[in-house]
Amino acid sequence: MGLPFVALSGASSIMYKNMGISDTQIALWTSLIMLPWTLKPLWGPFLEMYKTKKFFVYTTQIFTGLVFGLLALTLQLDHFFSFSIAMLTIIAISGATHDTAADGVYLNELTPKLQAKFVGWQGAFYNVAKVFSGGALVYLAGQLEKEIGIPSAWMVVMFIYGIIMVLLGLYNMRALPSSSQVKTTSSVREGFATLKDVIITFFQKKHIWASLCFIVFYRFAEGQAIKIVPLFFKASRESGGLGLSTSEIGLLYGVFGSIAFVLGSILAGYYVSNKGLTRRTLFILCAFFNFPFAAYAFLAIFMPTNLYVIAAAVAIEYLGYGYGFVGLILFMMQNIAPGKYKMAHYAFGSGLMNLGFMIPSMISGLLSDMLGYKEFFIWVLIATIPAFIVTWLVPLKTPEEIENDSATV
């Protein structure tokens, strides 16, 4: 799940930065192509009726791998930006479809207690992909850039993405459980009728509008910060950046970020498993998620040159990110997903969550260009306020309600 998403939202930003595309263009287009993760609820119900969730998991992984291979070839063309964005859009559609099916496997195979227990591990592995993509592969690209040039270096990296995805698809073809019931539909009309029912029942859920405000605004600050951070690291010190090399950025994410992120995700999983998702625990998770963005404001204001100081800031932010993101995922599993269409309703929730990330990301490049990096990251701290407000106000299901939901599905 993590590898295609981070390739599109993170690694591609560094690639385009090195290939001479402006921050405004990068932020706009690498955010806009994430739209399928918001729209995936529209085709989620059809996945409920055709084949199995396992089938869609491994077929989309293999297809995504093949399109990464085509993407690699476009980087050698004169109009590489347009062609590569088109390939990334196809990857986004495939990746969003994959995520819907993979979430369905998780929700259907595990009880609410096990979902809470392993949600930290789910987040940890998702973010292993994140730091592998934004860390190890970016570091490799930086090393290759010195030897074979920027376009060829990123072509090799995109081929590696493709190979990994194909291998994962072949592995999951054998490894995933096949207990999900095969469903078929006799007509397109039946499919759209199901979609209509999915939408109606979704918006009939108790406290649904408050829940949607929560999942949209929880990531409001993150959507702005995460898109600009690698561009800030890469930009020259004369323009307010830190002037890091591509390899140094990969090292920060791949070593310091990876350890902190995995640790934060695992600790949070055990924390919510023991404490449950209460207002107190959710507010603590929100604080862990948002306060560490102050680390980037510190870097932008003081512009340290010591790589270990920069690495410490990255580790603090990633630890908090990994810890706090678990709260959002578990909230959707227990407060959004339960019901007749568990997979489709979770897809609605995660799609709208992505919208809360995508829209701020789209304007982040314009804001950072207007304000400058220092003022931009100060603004990001102000932008965390809505997350705390919605976290404090959102209604939560009681443990008894969660158990009843599980028993009736």
Image (tube, rainbow, N blue to C red):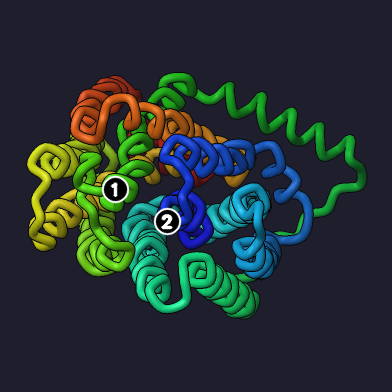
Locate residue 167, reporting x and y percent: 58, 78
Q: Which mark is residue 18?
A: 2
In front: 351, or 51?
351
Residue identified by numbered label 1: 235
Q: Which of marks 2 and 1 is nearer the N terminus?
A: 2
Q: Is there any visible trace of residue 47 in the rendered image? A: yes
**Residue found 29% across the figure and 40% down from its top:** 277
The three-letter code of the residue at mark 1 reads Ala
Label 1 secondary element: loop
Q: Is mark 2 on a helix, strand or loop?
A: helix
Comparing 219 with 134, the one in front is: 134
Residue under the point 65% across and 56% down? 78
Seen in the image, is 264 located left or right of residue 188?
A: left
Taking the image as shown, residue 369 lies to the left or right of residue 205, namely left
Q: Name the spot of residue 223 as percent of width and height, x first.
A: 38, 36
The residue closer to the viewer here, 65 or 146, is 146
- Who's the residue at 34% across and 42% down the image? 228
Using the numbered discs, state the Cα–Cα distance from disc 2 to disc 1 in whole angstroms: 10 Å
Q: Position of residue 249 (x, y in %)?
A: 28, 61
- Crowding at mark 1 (Cα within 10 Å: few <14, some 14-19, many 20+): many
State left or right for residue 69 relative to residue 124.
right
Question: Which quadrant of the figure contains the C terminus?
Answer: top right
Is 104 rendered above or below residue 149? above
Q: Name the residue located 77 percent from the left edge and 50 percent from the top edge.
A: 49
The answer to whether residue 270 shows anywhere in this view is no
Which quadrant holds residue 183?
A: bottom right
Label disc, if present, on residue 61 of the rendered structure: none
Residue 93: horizontal and vertical position, in percent?
Answer: 65, 49
Answer yes or no: do the residues labelled 2 and 1 have beta carbons within 8 Å?
no
Left/right placement of residue 86 relative to residue 313 reads right
Counting the numbered discs, the total is 2
Q: What residue type is labelled 2?
A: Asn
